[in-house]
Image (tube, coloured by chain):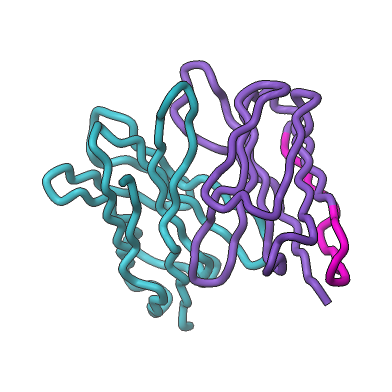
Amino acid sequence: AQSVTQPDIHITVSEGASLELRCNYSYGATPYLFWYVQSPGQGLQLLLKYFSGDTLVQGIKGFEAEFKRSQSSFNLRKPSVHWSDAAEYFCAVALFSGGYNKLIFGAGTRLAVHP
Amino acid sequence: DGGITQSPKYLFRKEGQNVTLSCEQNLNHDAMYWYRQDPGQGLRLIYYSQIVNDFQKGDIAEGYSVSREKKESFPLTVTSAQKNPTAFYLCASGHRTGSTGELFFGEGSRLTVL
């Protein structure tokens, strides 16, 4: 079955440090992959997406992600974290079946940023 | 501005009562979705609809009902049959034809059962 795994429930980094959030997916075909960010009590905002082509994709707020088919991974990175990046981050894969499409989400990684 | 509007933002309900969460979008999207969010569990799909007058059960549809009478609207009713309804509910919409799967989300509705 299709699934998304985010191995880290919580991550704490210092402001200015680099960040990598892990995401592994299980999907038979070429995946359409997404990273969303959620501030407390808010909806989800799209950070970036991968459909095809260049495996390194750039997103908003200085984030990037790299698709690695051999590792079934789509890790999110940022070279220098800002205090405003503290939020919850969700990785997702699009599932297309029977004329319907939907997103399957991971459990999320909560990021805390120390000053 | 185009977007998705969910209301109410906060809702309190007594046990045994049905409640309806509103979701309206003006993005001209065919597809609409309801997700439930609980701490540590990510987002779980309740119901989704690709066109008017058609909807499909998601992974956790028991105790919920929906309707899709208009393209713009996809209300969710949390019935008294839902055993643990306290949660954060998110509505989303997206394209159907030629879709890449990307979804756009509302700000959410937090339901608390007293």
Letter of the purple chain? B
The answer to whether residue B80 is magenta is no
Taking the image as shown, residue A16 lies to the left or right of residue B75, namely left
Percent of width and height locating residue A52 = 28, 29
Give the camera-side residue of A52 and A56. Answer: A52
Taking the image as shown, residue A87 lies to the left or right of residue B21, namely left
Percent of width and height locating residue A82 = 47, 68
Which quadrant would residue A38 be assigned to in this image?
bottom right
Is A106 placed above or below A57 here? Answer: below
Give the camera-side residue of A57 and B89. Answer: B89
Percent of width and height locating residue B5 = 78, 43
Letter of the cyan chain? A
Q: Residue at x 76, y 34 (%)?
A: B67
Is B100 placed above or below B34 here? Answer: above
Q: Residue at x 24, y 44 (%)?
A: A67
Q: How many marks?
A: 0
Percent of width and height locating residue A66 = 25, 47
Q: Residue at x 65, y 25 (%)?
A: B29
Give the camera-side residue of B20 and A113. Answer: B20
Residue situated furthest left in the rendering: A70
Taking the image as shown, residue B51 lies to the left or right of residue B41, namely right
Residue situated furthest front in the rendering: B81
Which quadrant is the N terminus of chain B positioned in? Answer: top right
Tell me the magenta residue range: B3-19
Which quadrant is the C terminus of chain B positioned in? Answer: bottom right
